[in-house]
Amino acid sequence: MAALFGAILAVLALAALGVVLWLLPEQHRRTAMRAAIGLWIAITCIALPVLLSRS
């Protein structure tokens, strides 16, 4: 159940990011996309070991 909730939150977050990126001018869109990718990598590097250690 928690995995389903997490997946729903991830989809909603991606949809919100898509809307924000669509509304931004091109120059800011690139910067925001780089920041989002960096944040995603950081979260993955932290969350993946935590999730794997629980199984």
Image (cartoon, grey):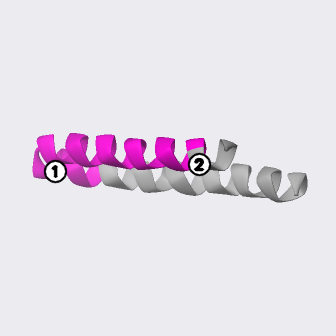
Task: Tell me which residue sits at (49%, 53%) in the image.
Answer: 38
* Magenta run includes residue 17: yes
The spot of residue 10 in percent (x, y) is: 48, 47
Query: Which span is picked out in magenta?
Result: 5-31
Which residue is labeled 2 in the image? 4
Q: Which residue is mark 1?
A: 27
Residue 51 or 43: which is nearer the viewer? 51
* Total residue callouts: 2
Residue drawn at 25 percent across, 55 percent down: 30
Q: Confirm whether residue 42 shows in the render.
A: yes
**Image quarter in which the C terminus is found:** bottom right
Q: Residue at x 41, y 42 (%)?
A: 13
Q: Secondary structure at mark 1?
A: helix
Using residue 49 as the reference point, say whether residue 21 is left or right of it. left
Give coordinates of residue 33: x percent, y percent: 33, 53
Crowdedness of circle 1 by 10 Å Cα count: few (<14), some, many (20+)?
few
